[in-house]
Amino acid sequence: MPEKIDAKYLKGLRFRGSEGKNVNEDGRTVIKYAPVERAMRVEDVLNWRDAGSAIVLVTTDGQKVTVSKTKEAKDEK
């Protein structure tokens, strides 16, 4: 298990998934899925690596995201 990523690299990223809801349809219960979008959390990151001037993330919703480290450094000042 890789160490946890710093949450500052997740700023502005969105997690996209779906949420199931039980619905009665024609006398039986079925699950209907609706899209959900929220801010990305540390536990949403499956794996990450430091690629020099950027961080590459793989998330649980199937995204591969590259985040620039230089942009983050400018935001902190």
Image (spheres, helix red, strand yellow):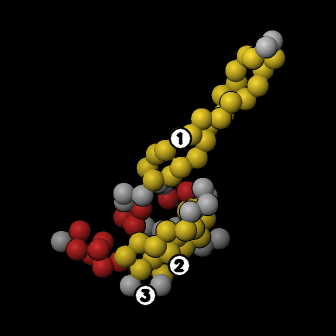
Residue 26 lies, in percent from the top left, at 79, 14
Q: Which image quadrant for residue 74? A: bottom left
Q: Quadrant of the C terminus?
A: bottom left
Q: Please tell me which residue lies in front, 45 or 66.
A: 66
Give how far across and how far down residue 37 sits, in percent: 49, 44
- Marks 1 and 2, how far apart at CA: 27 Å
Q: Nearer the viewer, mark 1 or mark 3?
A: 1
Mark 2 residue type:
Arg
Q: At x 30% / y 79%, what residue is drawn?
A: 70
Q: x and y percent of residue 14 in the render?
A: 45, 53
First in sequence: mark 1 vs mark 2 = 1
Residue, far right: 28
The residue where tag 2 is placed is 49
Q: Residue tagged by mark 3?
A: 52
The vertical placement of 57 against 21, above or below, is below
Label 1 neighbour load within 10 Å: few <14, some 14-19, many 20+: few
Please identify the quarter of the rendering in which residue 60 is found: bottom right
Three-letter amino acid code of the residue under disc 1: Val
Would residue 33 appear left or right of 35 to someone viewing this image? right
34 sits left or right of 56 in the view: right
Find disc 1 in the rendering and name its residue.
Answer: 36
Quadrant hosting residue 69 = bottom left
Give the Cα distance between marks 2 and 3.
Answer: 9 Å
In the image, residue 39 above or below residue 76: above
- Whether residue 60 appears in this view of the structure is yes
